[in-house]
Image: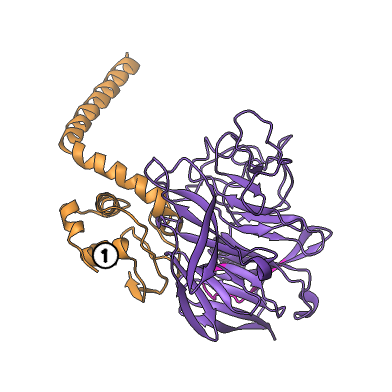
Chain colours: A orange, B purple
Amino acid sequence: MKTISFNLCLLFLICACQSSDKKMVQNSTLINQNFSKGKEIYNDFCMQCHMPKGEGVPKAFPPLAKSDYLKNNRLESIKAIKYGLSGTIIVNGEKYNSAMAAQGLSNEEITNVMNYITNSWGNKNTSLITEEEVSQVER
Amino acid sequence: MRTQKTTYCLLFLITFFACAQDKNPVNIKNSHEVVVSGLTNPWGFVFLPDNSILITEKAGKLIHFKNKTKKEIKGLPEIYVRGQGGLLDINIHPNYQNNGWIYFSYASPKGEEAGGNTAIMRAKIENDSLVEKELLYKAGPNTTKGQHFGSRIVFDKEGYLFFTIGERGNREENPQDITRDCGKVYRLNADGTMPTDNPFVNSKGAKQAIWSYGHRNPQGMELHPDTKDIWIHEHGPKGGDEINIIKKGKNYGWPIITYGRNYSGSSITNETKKEGMEQPLHYWDPSIAPSGMAFISSDNYGDWKGSLLVGSLKFSYLDRCELKNGKVVKEERLLDGIGRVRSIEQGPDGFIYVGVENLGIVKLIRN
């Protein structure tokens, strides 16, 4: 008897979880789609240096996860992906002096990857980047 | 007791941090002299008979460095600069002095589909411009994927043209299928025609230019100065970079066998060996991300003669691999921390020249 009620409880819990999940999904269908596209771009073009969880490589490639630079320099970050970046930058108190080449991504791809990296690994960006915003970023 | 614990902790910490790097010892008795400065990504370079240098910049520039000045060579074909693609390797015909042919590889958007794939072109230079351009090979289909263009170019002792094309980020379909391009080492006559003795000329549907297959992304290729065998190295996944000696028609195993894992750490295959597939001569775990390759065949570096040099993009050094009976018996770091090493050549003066990203081309000096 005990087991049955326990199982029932579990079942309720699972169902409850699922329904609330569903609601969340409905609210953010669009966002999720964009993130998965952004993730694909990230895995293809960015991951080899910035690593699978955005942790970077000490002294060589700055982290994206919980990066103050990414959080506070939205325009500069878009510019870096669009046109490349060289020279010293400071990320979370550490100096980095590698260069990043422009990857040849379209504005749409840059938008998607920016929204992915600013909403992954502990990063949160509620005001999503738009393609129009990216298209207006100049060198 | 406490000290013992501390020691263990320290040891653990050291091992932990060491994991990110490799264990090759640093040799500090060497230095460098910058020969060509102000380059961003010297993907390939070659010395001409007058000691000037032709240099490719990945972003799509061909530079002629002569009398200490850089001059841009115009007339390049359309180049697909995206991800790892761009203007890539460059070499000259063994009989360049008489025929003037230069050969280069690049990512090309030519074709029906969106994206690009590796192409090999030959041309001559006249008035700082490319002329008599001939497209010798263009891999297909195009893809917008950013990875694995391969692209090193070498001539063997009989004058055949060899080049590498990586698997273009499609390991499931390309490397093991000889009816598809990519993930292969190719062989053509120097004029681009098909040699009749290529291994798959009679296989139905096969890309006839294929010489060997099952490769991931070879960004280093060189003729061994004594045996005249073709040596390559290739980027593996995490922990599976390899050196291979290329033999006619052989399968080098990717992705059926590998010593590496996915970048995320998950497994690709449990197998490192399989019948009918070649074992690497050497593999790197952790990966060094190898690019550029040269043998020291001159007497300029004493007992380093006979060593194989491989650039490390990831750890920013020049890896000296000491060879004994065809095996790597020792490795050490030269030019440690210099920057991402992209290309290596032994110059006509017998010195080693190294192309380093965001630095230029430097001459290796043994102190």
Q: Where is residue A13 in the image (x, y as percent from the top left)?
A: 25, 26
Taking the image as shown, residue B142 lies to the left or right of residue B299, namely left
Q: Which amino acid does label 1 sit on?
A: Lys
Q: Where is residue B95 in the image (x, y as percent from the top left)?
A: 70, 65
> Which one is in front, B31 or B83?
B83
In the picture, the quarter occupied by the C terminus of chain B is bottom right
In the picture, the quarter occupied by the N terminus of chain B is bottom right
Q: Where is residue A107 in the image (x, y as percent from the top left)?
A: 25, 53
Residue drawn at (26%, 22%) of the image: A9
The residue indicated by pointer 1 is A79
Q: Is residue B119 above or below residue B99?
A: above
SS type, badge 1: helix
Taking the image as shown, residue A79 lies to the left or right of residue B53, namely left
> Which one is in front, B94 or B184?
B94
* B336 part of magenta stretch: yes
Taking the image as shown, residue A10 lies to the left or right of residue B283, namely left
Residue A93 in sight from this viewpoint: no
The part of the chain drawn in magenta is: B331-342
Residue drawn at (58%, 67%) of the image: B343
> Which one is in front, B195 or B105?
B195
Residue B346 in sight from this viewpoint: yes
Q: Where is residue A39 in the image (x, y as percent from the top left)?
A: 34, 46
Q: Which chain letter goes with mark 1?
A: A
* B321 part of magenta stretch: no
